[in-house]
Amino acid sequence: MLRIPCPWCGTRDESEFRYRGDATRVRPGPAATRADFVSYLYERDNPCGWHLEWWLHTGGCRKLLKVLRHTLTHEIRAVAAAHEPLALPRADERG
Amino acid sequence: MDPPAPPPSPRRSSGRYSALRLLREGLQQQRGWTRAWAKAAPKPSYRVLIIGGGGHGLATAYYLAAQHGITEVAVLERGPLGLGNVGRNTTIIRSNYFHPANIRFYEFSLKLWEGLEQALNFNAMVSQRGTLNLFHTEAQRDLFTRRANQMRLLGVDAEAVSAADVKALVPLVDLDNGRYPVLGGFLQRRGGTVRHDAVAWGYARAASERGVDIIEHCEVTAINRSGGRVIGVETTRGSIQADLVCLAVAGSSSRLARMAGLVLPIETHVLQAFVSEAIKPVLDVVLTYGAGHFYVSQSDKGGLVFGGAIDGYNSYAQRGTLPMAEEVAAAAVTLLPGLARLKILRQWGGLMDMSMDGSPVISQTPVDGLLLNGGWCYGGFKAIPAGGFTTAHLIATGAPHPVAAHLDLARFAEGRMVDERGVGPFPFAH
């Protein structure tokens, strides 16, 4: 059971949330090429390590959260609102 | 000083397995058996290197040797054979899909399963006990009927069965359960189960006998390229050159592909499975529950083998989490209340390659000399024979096999997704 610290509701069980996938993909602008859109829609880094991802708090405040979680240990290091900047650790610290 | 050269691999045939052989060995105190497959050491170079000694890797090696006469092949496995997903699944085989391209591919696989034991001379306990999918609403009945009709149009067996037939087939089912009463089902009699370890052992033995090197405890640490083309790999047992390298490492495809600079349309997720304590025979079909994601069969040892959906978020942890275990148990008890007092004997989690459209990938890649067999989501076991057969075809001829041509990697860029569930590019939803 993941325990996700929601900035609005406090720490809650994962069963209150709905996972919405990789949060590092940014929709390209109108001038982007087809390859940019293919990359945005389909290609995923899929790291074994720190992963920035969306969780929707459906059973709570219904806000979309940005969560930094480790895909091997499930440790949650940071949670932010959707519009707040939250970066992945540097490549050499991602392990 | 150079290390001593490894001894030549003892490519001694394990002989033909038969009832007569069993009797003869029994009379000779079981002294005549030899290794089922040779413990090969890596040679400096091969024509084809297959990374991953699971079901698909071993099957690919076997069909390369048996169908195409290509035997300068090595299968590299990080650990011992059979401990990956090939030996950790719920052992179900079926071809009851909705998409015509999927029906053709999985039916091709089911036909290979039907002749597999004779082809490999290995008892894989292929048991066509039938797969029964239940429906619980009228809309679901219409959808399942359409699916069954689609299958019949393509010459695959499928039949609609009434609620009374369901009760006759599986007396344990609670037809009138409060939340999701069972209205009927959809039966594929040729579906069933297979002893999964025997699939790995059978393919390994048959491939080894034809000259393929099966190299265990050999982890790939880098993929070497020259001028954009793959030329070999670095492993924990030294570097190996190859003309072609094929990845068959579902669950870890992204990690291996990254070694060649490739980003895939795949995410890694965890799927759990469960086995109960052994009981007397109570279930002689593979049963699936249409109102949730739940499937169950009874093994020959008597344990009920069952599972549900993936845990639902990216994970490389080979263990499941409790919310999904609870959901699966709830589905089990809703559908089959008689199971409520059974104890769970084992529970485990394995890594799945979840692709962006829920369908696998058997394809050339943008990297010259690198091929991919992966993206199996949670349906790789039933596809082992067809996956191996068509991957071997792609390696040997350079062109996709007709039943697997729709599984190429370019389909994502070209908008030809094979989205069986129709949920879009969200791996956690497939």
Image (tube, coloured by chain):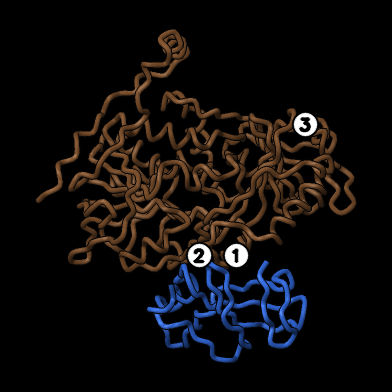
Chain colours: A blue, B brown
Callout 2–callout 1 Cβ contact below 8 Å: yes
User: Would you place residue B328 above or below residue A65 in this image?
Assistant: above
Q: CA distance from mark 2 to mark 1?
A: 9 Å
Counting other residues with Cα less than 10 Å from the Cα at mark 3, is it few (<14), some (14-19), or many (20 or more)?
some
Counting other residues with Cα less than 10 Å from the Cα at mark 2, is it few (<14), some (14-19), or many (20 or more)?
many
| B64 left or right of B250 in image | left
Give the mark nearest the N terminus, 2 or 1: 2
Residue that numbered label 3 is attached to: B169
Residue B377 x, y percent position in the rendering:
53, 55
Residue B48 x, y percent position in the rendering:
26, 46
**Res B133 → quadrant:** top right
User: Would you place residue B313 above or below residue B318 in this image?
Assistant: below
Residue at (78, 34) in percent of width and height: B170
**Res A63 → quadrant:** bottom right
Q: What mark, if any, has residue B428 been given in the picture? A: 1
Q: Element type at marker 1?
A: helix
| A30 left or right of B420 in image | left
Quarter of the figure that contains the C terminus of chain B? bottom right
Amino acid marked by disc 1:
Phe
Residue at (25, 37) in percent of width and height: B71
Residue that numbered label 2 is attached to: B267
Q: CA distance from mark 2 to mark 3?
A: 38 Å
Q: Chain of mark 1?
A: B
